[in-house]
Amino acid sequence: EILITMLDIASSSHLDCQLVEINLLLSLALQKMGQEEASMEKLKAAVVLAKKLGFIRPFVEAGKSAMVLLNSLKEKGVAIDFIDEIDQLIIKVSDKKDTALHENIEVSEKVVLTERELETLELLASGLRNKEIANALFVSEGTIKKHVYNMGQKFETSSRVDLLNRTRQLGLIQ
């Protein structure tokens, strides 16, 4: 019901990007409720509008669960090239996440860093200061300080130098 209300608001306000996202979410929800036909209808609406806008992110964020539905739509001849493009991006992103998590668990003795912590760590290792890292990642300097603090807690280190030395020893950075 909430998604339907949001869909009405987005439609009347001409919020095209939100329409794509809401239709995708509705499609996934309807599919889980066993309403395949309605699910395909919402997915088709999302794909047609997303293709027009060049808006892929919501499908990539939905990941492999969206790909199952998208492949059904592709079999019906809808936006084949666009769906292939989404599929390639989902595979690329999921492989990267799977690899990063797998390496972290093995290499760092069960310490798992978030994707953002890994990005922060790499920039930290390149010699950037908190403010420079914040600018590069489009977040506040306080957020970067918190990421560095959290990583220090995970690796039981009390300084940036110790954190970098520890993560280098574990092979997380060069």
Image (cartoon, rainbow, N blue to C red):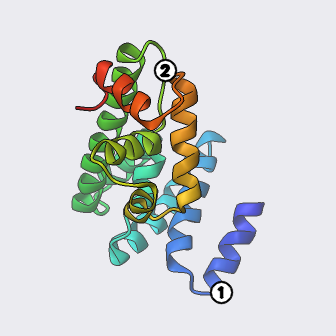
Q: Quadrant of the N terminus?
A: bottom right
Circle 1: element type: helix
Circle 2: element type: loop
Q: Which mark is residue 111?
A: 2
**Residue 68 in sight in this render:** no
Furthest residue in direction right, as rendered: 1
The residue carrying mark 1 is 12
Q: Nearer the viewer, residue 166 or 23?
A: 166
Q: Amino acid at mark 1?
A: Ser
Q: Residue at x 57, y 54 (%)?
A: 143
Q: Count the labels in the image.
A: 2
The quarter holding residue 171 reads top left
Q: Between tags 1 and 2, which lies in front?
A: 2
Q: Distance between the Cα atoms at labels 1 and 2?
A: 47 Å
Q: Is residue 143 left or right of residue 116?
A: right
Give the x, y percent position of residue 73. Answer: 37, 53
The quarter holding residue 101 reads top left
Give the x, y percent position of residue 174. Answer: 22, 32
